[in-house]
Amino acid sequence: MPKQIAPLKKTRVRGSTSGRPIMALLDLLGRRWTLRIIWELREQPLTSRALRTACDDASPTVLQARLSDLRGAGFVELIPGDGYRLTVLGRELFEEFLPLHRFAERWSKRGAS
């Protein structure tokens, strides 16, 4: 049975003193390698080593810190023998970011103004 995640506490996060959930989420997602980890886990579970390779050999210390953050937030889980994978909540987050990804692709191809 999946571990129950406690509701987020109203705490200060970088750039905000409100503790609002959107600010906490943006703080988490703005940390180095966080979005890349979510992206790399979008299709299949990956071991720590495979994830590190997929993330251009990110520092193992930073990678483990981010995985710990993502596990604590309920977006990633560790499956013994398989590695890390997105949870249902993590997949939902990924799906929410797809429109932004598509927008970024269009934006990057715009003509110089």
Image (cartoon, rainbow, N blue to C red):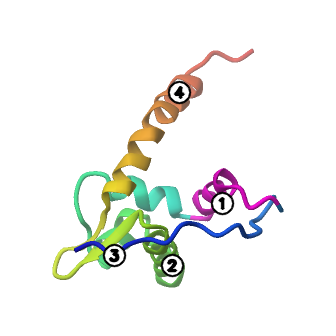
Label 3–label 2 contact, CB within 8 A: no
Report crowding for label 3: few under 14, some 14 to 19, many 20 or more residues within 10 A (C-alpha): few
Q: Quadrant of residue 75?
A: bottom left
Marks 1 and 2, the one that precedes in the sequence: 1
Q: State the separation of the CA atoms marked 1 and 4.
A: 23 Å
Q: Which residue is tagged 1?
A: 24
Marks 1 and 4, the one that precedes in the sequence: 1
Discs 1/2, front: 1
Q: Which residue is tagged 4?
A: 103
Q: Position of residue 8 (x, y in %)?
A: 59, 67
For the point 55% across and 31% down, the residue is 104
Marker disc for residue 3 = 3
Q: Which residue is tagged 2?
A: 59
Marker disc for residue 113 = none
Discs 3/4, front: 3
Report crowding for label 1: few under 14, some 14 to 19, many 20 or more residues within 10 A (C-alpha): many
Marks 3 and 2, the one that precedes in the sequence: 3
